[in-house]
Amino acid sequence: MPEKNRTYRARIEGYTSEGLGVARIDGQAVFVHRALRGEDCDVLILKVLKNAAFGKVVQVHEPSPHRREPDCPWYGRCGGCDFRHMDREEELYAKRQRVQDALHRIGGSGVSVEAIYSGEPLHYRNKSQYPVSADGQVGFYKARSHQLVPVERCLLQKPPADAAADALRRYIETYRVPGYDEKTRRGLLRHLYIRTNQAGQSLICVLVNGKKLPHEPELVSLLRQAVPETVGVVLGVNTQPTGAILGGEYRILWGEDVLTDRLCGLTFRLSVPSFYQVNHDMAEVLYRTALDFAGLTGTETVLDLYCGAGTITQVMARRAGRVIGAEIVPAAIEDARENARRNGIGNVEFFCGDASAVAADFAARGLRPDVICVDPPRKGLSPDVVSAAARMQPQRIVYVSCDPATLARDVKLFAQEGYGAVRAAAVDMFPGTANIESVVRLERTK
């Protein structure tokens, strides 16, 4: 077993799901920060656990041809990125392998990841969320902590987002507005939220621990000067003692409280709490892949669970006979209905409710969709949703996932219900980070 604070020479064999290098030292797996596959390194052991250890590279004897100098001065301090020390080719290899390994090892499936799709790696995020610290700093959290790093420019965010963050810093400094302290639960400013569409317009929301802010007109003026294409500034109330960013109450300070965007040839109306993929161009690739995997001919009934603002629902509707969307967030369902109306799509209907309850209700009522599409949050599906989906006996299930591990776990559950994975693909929605989206097509085997 390796010893803490001792240095060992080791070869890096592969990557963890978080992008750490993996080596074996004295028979134990060691996860190594900023190490690349194939490298011969001196590794300093930082922490030893029962079944694994963690270390960092202190010297590389044989650097990988994929190693590069990080292009961000905050890399390693800010927790936003994981792969800025390697080139895109190696990043895409690591991500595709992560999905493949999860499906094989956790899911017990023999399906192969047929492709990984990628796009522009810089300034792709159309939604940005900047936490505010108790001492009024604006930036991003250090990895696995709530220790704020005051990042001034981010290679992932769009320029209007960084400009809005600068404006909020000036507001805090000028009017001495206190940031929120998670320990004492005092202070006002919690987060800055900004969403930007393809036309360059932005919707800005300031989340506060209270009902109002001092000098609200001055804040609006600063934000509008910094981001001239702003369509609205909204105040979000979040007085809950949790780490949740959004609250349940919003008040317009100026302009509109929604933003519209074009995706896959459709128009979507987005309120602050609406779910919407953060990478526009790769979202189109993701939805085209899901549509391809659905194998629609124009007559099918499709059930879309976790439908959000109805994006996948409406994309599917153009190739299906009827599509039913379900989502637990009431505001998102309102957006979904409005979006369908705007786009002139009449063969869709939306239900507000928990996915487990909706799926169980539909199964009990004898609904028999030809295709079920699921796009759950990171925690994946509950066993209730898996069993209810299987009871409806669709021909195909299209599973869109943002976490390969929970996807693979659910693929295994579906296999027990008679559905096997036959196609899989990965979509790099989040370049620079360890996150990866994937799509799996399951078919009924019994």
Image (spheres, rainbow, N blue to C red):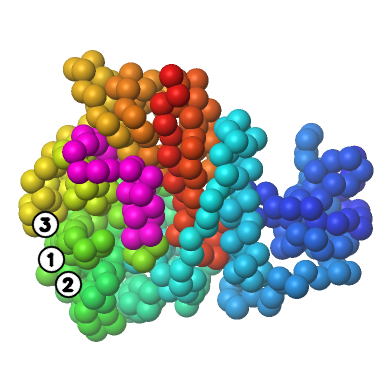
Q: Which residue is mark 2?
A: 231
Horizontal side, residue 23 vs residue 258: left or right: right
Residue at x-position 22% and y-position 48% = 319
Task: Pinpoint residue 296: horizontal percent, then vertical percent.
Answer: 27, 43
- Tell me if residue 148 comes above or below residue 411 in the rendering: below
The mark that comes first in sequence, 3 or 1, is 1
Q: Which mark is residue 235?
A: none
Q: Quarter of the image containing the C terminus?
A: top left
Point out the stretch of residues depicted in magenta: 284-307
Tell me, yes or no, if residue 63 can be seen here: yes
Q: Is residue 299 magenta?
A: yes
| Mark 1 vs mark 2, CA separation in Å | 6 Å
**Which of labels 2 and 3 is toward the front?**
3
| Mark 2 vs mark 3, CA separation in Å | 21 Å
The residue type indicated by label 1 comes to Glu
Q: Residues within 10 Å of mark 3 (few under 14, many from 20)?
A: few
Q: Residue furthest front?
A: 297
Q: Residue furthest top?
A: 364
Task: Pinpoint residue 386: horizontal percent, then vertical percent.
Answer: 40, 25
Q: Which residue is mark 3?
A: 343
Tell me, yes or no, if residue 332 can be seen here: no
| Mark 3 vs mark 1, CA separation in Å | 20 Å
Q: Quarter of the image containing the N terminus?
A: top right
Tag 3 near tag 1, CB within 8 Å: no
Assign a secondary structure to mark 2: strand
Task: Pinpoint residue 294: horizontal percent, then vertical percent.
Answer: 34, 42
- Tell me if residue 124 comes above or below residue 248 in the rendering: below
Assign a secondary structure to mark 1: loop
* The image quarter in which residue 215 lies: bottom left
Residue at x-position 12% and y-position 47% = 337
The residue type indicated by label 3 comes to Asn
